[in-house]
Amino acid sequence: MLLKNIQKILLVFIITTNIFGQAGVNDGFSIEEEDLNIGGDIFSDFNEDIESNQVMEDERFYRYGRFFTFSFSLGLTTFTGNRGVVYENEHPSYGLQLSIFKDFQTAISIGIGFSRHNMYFDQTNLEGFNGEAPSFVQVSQLRVYTGYKYYIDTSNLGTAITYSNPYITGRLEYWYTTNKFIDNENIPNRNGGGLGVGLGGGLEFPIKLKESYLGVEFLYHNVNFFDKNTGAYRPVIEDLSGDAFTTMMSYIWNW
C-alpha cells in the first residue's frame, strides 16, 4: 500500500515538472526566435520612423519650399588697411547671383560682382614708375564666386524674425583687379587675379511670398590681391594690403 502511494506521488511530481518545464522552454525559444528573426530586427521600427519623417519632410519641401532664386544687387564695397587709405570708392557696386536650394535650410550659390575705385598719385619719385607720375588711377574689380548658404531655423522664434529668413554664408571667390592709368598713357594697365574667401550673413524679406524678396547681405572678404604686396607706390604708401567689406541690397526672384 505504501509503495503504491509513493508511486502516485512520484507520478504527479513528474507530470507537474514536465508541464512547467515545457512552458518555460517554449517561452524562452519564442523570445529568442523573435530576437533572431530578420523580420523582427530591433532597429526596424526606428528605421521606419526615419524613412517616414524623411518622406514627410521632402513632401513639405516640394510643396512649400523655394527651389531657385535669382537676384540683382546694388551696394557698397569698402576696404581696410593701406588699400582703404588710398582708395576712393565709386558707388554703387553691382552683383548677380543664382541660388539652388537643397532643402529648407541649405542652398548653393554662384554669382559675380563688380565695383570701381580710384587712386591719385602726382609724385614722380615713386619706386615703380621710373620717374613718371601715375596721377589718376582707375581700379576695376570683378569677382566671381561659389558659396554655401545656411538658413537659420526660426520656427520657434517670433513671426517677424521668421519672415526675415536670416542666413549665414561662406564663399570661395576670385577677384580680378585692373589698374588703368587714365592720365598717363605711357604707363600700361596693370592687372591680375587673386583668390579669397567671403564670410557673413543676410536677411531676405518677402515682398510676395514664394515669388519675390528684398534682401540685405553683409560680407567680410579676405583676398590675396595680385598687387597686395607691391612696393610700386613707395615712399607714399608701403603696400596695398587690406581686406574688403561689402553691403548689398538685392531684389530676389523666386521660383
Image (cartoon, grey):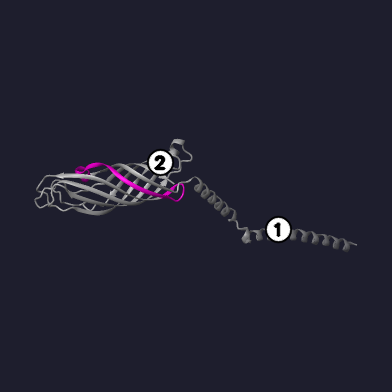
Marks 1/2: CA–CA distance: 65 Å
Q: Examine the rendered structure and indicate whether residue 91 appears above or below residue 26.
A: above
| Vertical side of 112 occupied by 30: above or below | below
Q: Marks 2 and 1: in contact by CB < 8 Å?
A: no
The residue shown at (29%, 50%) is 143
Taking the image as drawn, is residue 83 in sight? Answer: yes
Frontmost residue, 123 versus 190: 190
Check disc 2 and report the residue beneath it: 213
Asked if residue 100 lies in the magenta stretch, the reply is yes
Q: What count of labels does the image hold?
A: 2
What residue is disc 1 on? 27
Query: Looking at the image, which is closer to me, 161 or 96?
Result: 96
Kind of residue at badge 2: Tyr
Q: Is residue 89 above or below residue 197?
A: above
Q: Amino acid at mark 1?
A: Asp
**Residue 158 visible in the shown view:** no
Residue 253 appears left or right of 188: right
Mark carried by residue 179: none
Horizontal and vertical percent for residue 158? 46, 36
Q: Residue at x 87, y 61 (%)?
A: 5
1 vs 2, front mark: 2
Residue 73: x, y in percent?
A: 33, 43
Secondary structure at badge 1 equals helix
Q: Which residues are magenta?
A: 82-107
* Rendering quarter of residue 76: top left
Q: Position of residue 220 (x, y in %)?
A: 31, 45
Element under label 2? Answer: strand
Q: Residues within 10 Å of mark 1 (few under 14, many from 20)?
A: few
Q: Nearer the viewer, residue 81 or 42?
A: 81
